[in-house]
Image: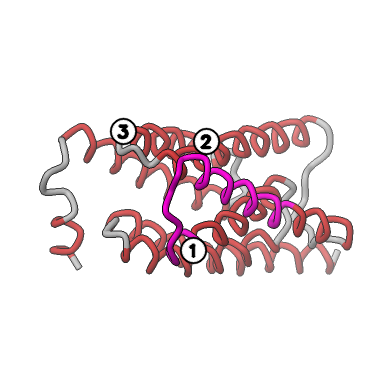
Amino acid sequence: MIDFLISQYKNASTNQICLEFLAFVFGIISVYCAKKENIWVYPTGLISTVITVYLLYQASYFGDMTMNAYYSIMSIYGWYKWMSKSKETELLITRTNSKEKIIGFIFFILTMFITYLVYKFFDYKLEIPNYIDIFTSGIFFTAMWYMAIKKIESWTLWIIGDCIAVPLFAHRGLGMLSLQYLIFTILAILAYLEWKKILNNYNLR
């Protein structure tokens, strides 16, 4: 495992390695903060995605770069949502209602469609990993919206998406990202259990 991770960065610059490590660390911190319902989930997550956008631009992965810019915008929305609610009334963990399920499904389909168009715009040759990436993009963006309104289903989607992303990034030779998503999966499972416990406590009141 260590050899696999190291071999991917033999020809990488010190700057690239440092930036990838920072994106890795801030990504982990962001998920941990989300688990604890801490608003720092958004500024730390934003640092991670902005660094990732830069690295993908440098590597000329313009399709993936565009999608990470898309996630950065959603992080800003979530940050605003959590801040505005904290000033008015507390934003509590809840389950999605029928309307939110429909909106989530629309986000899922729309994000997949936009991701597909991004690949086509940059003239990517679409292969099986790209179609998997399109699918996980829909999952992750919907999860981000559910996270912004503190829906427990966000963690279910994160778990599904993370489980798919681990072998996907490993297949692409992106060892550090694969490891990061493995850690994300573990944290997402723990976060789901913690949010479920909090939600059950609300129902007992």
For mark 2, does the 10 Å Cα neighbourhood hold few (<14), some (14 to 19), or many (20 or more) residues?
A: some
Distance from Cα at disc 2 to Cα at disc 3: 14 Å
- Which amino acid is tagged 3? Gln
Q: Residue 69 carries which label?
A: 2
Mark before the other along the chain sequence, 1 or 3: 3
* Coordinates of residue 43 in the picture (x, y in percent): 52, 34
Q: Which of 112 and 79 is in front in this view?
A: 112
* Coordinates of residue 146 in the picture (x, y in percent): 71, 52
Residue bearing mark 3 = 58
Q: Which mark is residue 162?
A: 1
Q: In this view, does 85 lie above or below 156?
A: above
The residue sitting at 57% across, 51% down in the picture is 116
Mark 1 and mark 3 in contact? Answer it, CB < 8 Å. Answer: no
Residue stretch in magenta: 107-132
- Whether residue 185 sits left or right of residue 95 in the image: it is left
Secondary structure under badge 1?
helix
Distance from Cα at disc 2 to Cα at disc 1: 19 Å
Secondary structure under badge 3?
helix
Quarter of the picture containing the C terminus is: bottom right
For mark 3, does the 10 Å Cα neighbourhood hold few (<14), some (14 to 19), or many (20 or more) residues?
A: few
- Which amino acid is tagged 1? Asp
* Coordinates of residue 175 in the picture (x, y in percent): 27, 58
Q: In which quarter of the image is residue 181?
A: bottom left
Mark before the other along the chain sequence, 2 or 3: 3
The residue sitting at 76% across, 69% down in the picture is 200
For mark 1, does the 10 Å Cα neighbourhood hold few (<14), some (14 to 19), or many (20 or more) residues?
A: many
- Which amino acid is tagged 2? Ala
